[in-house]
Structures are given as structure tokens and as C-alpha cells.
Amino acid sequence: MMYFRTIFPACVLMAAFFGTWEGYVAVSGTSPLVLPAPSDVLNGLWVERAAIGRHARATLSVAALGFSLSVMFAFIVSVVLHFSGWLRRGMMPLLVASQTVPIVALAPLMVLWFGFGLLPKVLLVILVTFFPMVVSLMAGYASLPRPYRDQLVSMGATRWAVFRRATLPSARAHFFAGLKISATYAIVATIFAEYAGARHGLGIYILSAKNNFRADLVLSAVLVSAILTLMCLSAIRGIEQATGRRYRRVNDA
Amino acid sequence: MLEVQQLTIQAGNTVLVDNLSLDLAEGRLTCLIGPSGCGKSSVIKWLSGVLAPDLDVQGRACINGAIEPLPHRDIAYQPQQDTLFPWLTITENVSLGLEVRGLGRTAAREKLRGLFAHFGLAGHEGSFPDQLSGGMRQRAAFLRTIVQDARVLLLDEPFSALDAVTRLRMQDWLMARLREQPRAVLMVTHDLYEATQMADRVIVMAGHPGRIIANIPITIPYAERCEATLADIRSTLKSMLIKDTS
């Protein structure tokens, strides 16, 4: 019942949006080359399901690899920055600057430097998803209430013991918030990288469909990318809930 | 047992605590009272090793005559809040101090066996802090402090977050525990009544800069302490505090 109440407003709004869209296309007589109706998009998805499925799997595998590496690097870097004030002061401006580089300019260069293989795409996913993770983790580490730290220090805890026993657990909520933001970017970044140059993936499929004036297939691929992103978010939310019953108490404390 | 010698704490050019010396004896509870900002908590934080690192500190802490670095394993600290970690069970919280001090998890749990009932926490070993009442949380925090086997306990306003009735019960409860396991206790409090009811000695601090202005022993046996027997001491302390803050 609770789940139904949660998703009901989204279902109503989506139905209203797609209903209006479908009605507008039917009434206005707009060409499907310019604006296909939602029913045309679904039809295209059904007809092309095998090809789109193949490309979606390619996109998902690149996004998963890039995202996993990004989370791992972000965690390691955040720990290093947490323990070294000097490095933190030096690295944070560089990390911020890395986010000002337009991905539209960088993606073709990555393909130029590293070819059409896996590497440029994975690097782009890491570049896009790494920063939100690091910032979230750093904010989480800083959120440890001072009395908790003092309590452990007075017991003779080392800096590492304070980190392991208090700082890290208290950063859990921030970690998952960053994970969700980064996961949202991961699929989009992969598609962008594929768009710049790839053999497989939704990005190259969208480019090919666009060049063939198949707006319905472009939107079919966009729909699949949205579903993939929602699946990633659901998986993360599931992991968060399954592993963290005791940590939900942190926010209530 | 513990001596603080010539402690001066400065923040830039502002002297927070000026040349403060005091000593704590085993089995004796000493209360530190004074107006807000007089440096009571700074003294206790320094002794616990958690004073902000940007403050300038001069002075020595001697344990049994030897100058010792801080924090020290013979000194246990309990801050104003109970600081039970919300993601740990009561057992995990209580054994934390033992584990941090190097005892293995199994040995720490073994040491705690039977103590929960003694501290009124039987049946709550697996509960989380938010499932306990304020008094029970405070008892769990005391158990965590006491089980560390430190000979000096530093209590920074340990009852300030409790309601009046729970506070009175906890005062009696703590005194009973300290009779069973005598320690040298330094307790910071704002409450004149609490200080005179519990302490063997009351040290009065004045502010700006923080310094000791009186050191008053209370020789009335604990069982005989009441409004009538403590009236004179309370009156003296009250006039000192009012004079200092006016």
C-alpha cells in the first residue's frame, strides 16, 4: 500500500504527459519524422528490441565498469584527502576545475587519444561520476559530530581508529547520496562517450537513428537509457536499505 | 592520584584559564563549578586530550607523581552528551572503549558479562540507543566510561540533559557505583545543589580569566546531606558565584 502511494503520483503525471503528447500529435498532424507519438516510439522499440537490447547491454557494461572504478577511486582519494590537509587544499581546486571541462569537447579527444575501445568511454564515465562521489564522501567525513570524535580520542583512539569507528559510519548517508547522483550521470556519460565514437552502445545507436531520420528510434533509445538509469538507482536504493538498517538511526540521533 | 600543575590555556592573546592547579584523590568526587565561560570544560577537555589544537597550553598533568602525556589510559572522559553511537548496539557501544584500548572483541564482551544487570540495562544489550530512555542511555554511557578501568573519571555535566527526577535518581545511582568502585572523579556542573549533594570537595572558578577562587571541602556524610545540613555551604557558594558574575 505504501509503495503504491509512493509511485501513484508519478504514474498519474506520466500518464497525463504521454496522453497529452499522443493527443497533440494526433490532432496537429505533425510528421512522425519530426515528432513521433509515444505509441510510435513504443512500436519502434518493440520492432527494434533485439538491436536496442544488444546496444543497451554494451552501454550498461561500460557504465557499470566505469562507475565501479569511479566509486573505488573516489573512496581511496577521499580517504587520502581526509588524512592530508595539505593534499586536500591542493587537490580540491583541481577537482573542481576538472568539472568545468565540457564533456562535449573532451569526448572526441578521448576517442582520438585512446581509440574506439573501452578505455576512452570508461575514462569519461570516471571523469563525470568521480567528483560528486568525492565531494559527498568529504562532506560525510566532515559531518561527524565533534563529541563523537572527542569520545574516541579520549579513549586513546588513533586517527585511523576514529576514522574507521566513527567517521566512516557517519558518512554512510552522504556516500549513498553521492552514489545516486553519480549513477544518474553514469549512463548519460557512457552514451555521450559512445556518441563521440564507438562500435556498440546506445550512443552510437542514437547517432545512427538520427542520421536515418528515425526520431521514433532515437526516442526509443532515450527511453531505454532512462529505464537503465532508474534500474541503477533502484539497485543502489535496494543495497542501501538491505545493508543499513542500523545506520538509518544516524539521522535520527 | 592526579595533579594538575599550573595550567594556563590561551586563545591568541585571550587567557581562558590562568595558572590553575588542583589535585584529585582516589575515592573522592571533586566538583568544579563556576559561571559559563570560566574555563571549566576547557580544563576537563585538556585532561581528556581533546582540547582544540589551536589553543596554547602550558601546564602539566601528573599521575602518581609522574608527568604523563594526554590523553592517558588512566583517565576516562564522559562529555555532556551521552555520545552513544546511534549505529551501534548498547553492547557494541559499551565495549568500544575496551576495544579501542586494545582488548579483543570477545574479551571485551566477556568482561561486560553481568555488568548490564548491575547498571540497570539487562535485556537491552542488543538495543540501539534511540530505543532507550534518557536515564538508560546515561547509564550505558557511565558503564562505557567505568568499564575502561581508568582510575580517574572526568564527567562534564553528565546529568545536564536529564529531567529533574531522572537526574536525582542518576545522582544516587552514580554515588552507589562509586562507593563500589572508588575512583578519583572530577565533575563539572552548573548546578550548585548537585555539586554540594555529591561532592567531597567543591572547587569554585571565576571567569575572565578562568581561575580558582575557592576550594571548599564538604565533610558532611553523604547519607546526612539535605537542605538543612548543606544550607550554609550552599549559601557561601551562592554568594561567591553571584559576586563573581555581578
Image (spheres, rainbow, N blue to C red):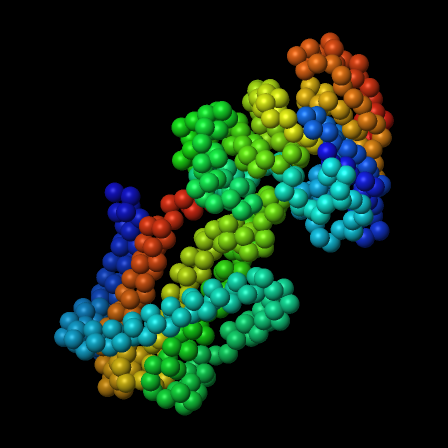
Q: In the figure, A23 relative to B54: above or below?
A: below
Q: Residue furthest left?
A: A47
Q: In the figure, A176 relative to A45: above or below?
A: above
Residue A103 appears anywhere in the view? yes
**What is the x, y in percent for residue B113?**
45, 31
Q: Viewer-proximal residue, B22 or A139?
A: B22
Residue A236 quadrant: bottom left
**What is the x, y in percent for residue B161?**
59, 31
Compared across the picture, whether A59 is left or right of A152 comes to: left
Image quadrant holding the N terminus of chain B, namely top right
Residue A252 appears anywhere in the view? no
Q: Residue furthest front?
A: B65
Q: Viewer-proximal residue, A130 or A69?
A: A69
**Residue at the location (53% across, 29% down)?**
B139
**What is the x, y in percent for residue B19?**
85, 41
**Residue at the location (16% across, 75% down)?**
A50
Compared across the picture, whether A160 is left or right of A221 comes to: right
Q: Viewer-proximal residue, A22 or A251?
A: A251
**What is the x, y in percent for residue A124?**
41, 77
**Residue at the location (28% across, 47% down)?**
A3
**Residue at the location (68% across, 21% down)?**
B198
Residue A119 quadrant: bottom left
The number of numbered badges drawn on the structure is 0
Q: Residue furthest bottom?
A: A112
Image quadrant holding the C terminus of chain B, namely top right
Compared across the picture, whether B85 is left or right of A158 comes to: left
